[in-house]
Amino acid sequence: MKRLDPLVKAYGRRFKREYAEFFKEIGKHDRIIVFRHIKPDFDALGTQMGLVEFLKANFPEKEIHYVGDDHVTFCPRIFPNAERLGEEAFEKPFMAVIVDVGDHSRIADPRYTKADYVFKFDHHPFNAEVAKCSVLDRSAAAASEIVADCLLHFPHTTIGKEAAKYLYIGIVGDSGRFMYSSTTPHTFAVASALINTGIDINAIYQNMYQKKIEDLKVTAYVLSNFKVSPHGVAYYLLPQDIQDKFEITSERGKENVNVFSNIEGINAWCSITEDPNPKDYCWRVSIRSKKADISGIANKWGGGGHAQASGARIDDIKDLDRFIKDLDDLFA
Ligand code: AMP
């Protein structure tokens, strides 16, 4: 029997049936493909790669794959680029494991539907079920927290350093370095078990938050051009011409959003970056908040997410003032 922290044990009791089904199905399938959400972040990538490394280390006889679109700076610096699997990989029988995403439209590769069995781990709001069995905990700080808990319970296996590193990155990323209110004693219990594998957390933080000198120029632009609404919503816009000037994409533009995180009088903050993709033109919004739940506003504006970290979109920039007012009203 594994020695587990009481909080981890209690969490496992809550999902006893789902964990048992997951262990049984992993045992039954020789081929497993792990899926993540589009526009992946630390948690999507960390959960996926943590699970992949765990399965590869503990079940070397199985074929394990991972798919999705890559992150412009995290891949391949922190996570390997995803595999580019051809159609034939999805014609043979396989089990799909979907992590950190609940909606069909946000799963980065729709071919999970070809699996003969689908399992899901998630902490996003529930819409339509995409899996045969799910572990869904909306209150978890990160999908990595849930998956790490499940793997700690997996009989006759161990979480190695490589898997632990990725899962730890996922937890740190989605808990805002253990600062969001979604962080609980259970989050720390799982993080502690991962650190106990011997991972080098200093090296992990250095790699996660590494920037280039040129990135500071974008930060300087943001700090010179942001606005603040009457009740403390800070926001900055990065139109296409500015992104071109700094040679960044809209995905990279949001990386400055947290420069407003500890400023007195600022309750919520957003990056608003133009995405010129002709198939899906919009301004992509990343919203963060100190305390208030901003996920409802994100939902209203074509997105979703969590209480203190959500994503949304503005299709026509003429609606910017309406969007900011919606957020501002939360603090009126
Ligand atoms: P972002 O600002 O893109 O980093 O997103 C912050 C958080 O909100 C992440 O956990 C995303 O997974 C989540 N999120 C972003 N967009 C959506 C969406 N359209 N639906 C559900 N969750 C989202």
Image (cartoon, rainbow, N blue to C red):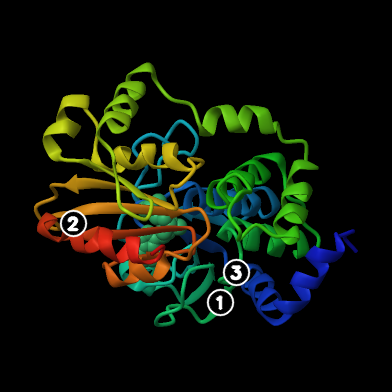
Type of amino acid under label 3: Ser
Q: Nearer the viewer, residue 281 or 155?
A: 281
Earlier along the polypeptide chain: callout 3 or callout 2?
A: 3
> Is the residue marked 1 within 8 Å of ligand 1, measured from its CB?
no
- Write the residue at 82% across / 68% down: 9
Mark 2: few, some, or many residues within 10 Å (few <14, many ≥20)?
some
**What's the CA distance linking mark 1 and mark 3?**
15 Å
Q: Are marks 1 and 3 in contact (CB under 8 Å)?
A: no
Type of amino acid under label 2: Leu
Which numbered tag is attached to residue 320?
A: 2
Mark 1: few, some, or many residues within 10 Å (few <14, many ≥20)?
many
Question: x, y (%) of residue 81?
Answer: 40, 40
Does residue 67 appear anywhere in the picture? no
User: In the drawing, does residue 87 fall left or right of residue 45?
Assistant: left
Type of amino acid under label 1: Ser
Q: Nearer the viewer, residue 139 or 145?
A: 139
Whether 203 is drawn above or below 250: the answer is above
Which numbered tag is attached to residue 5?
A: none
User: Which quadrant holds residue 74?
Assistant: top left
Residue with the mark numbered 3: 139
Name the quadrant where ligand 1 sits.
Answer: bottom left
**What's the CA distance linking mark 2 and mark 1?**
37 Å
User: Which quadrant holds residue 204?
Assistant: top right
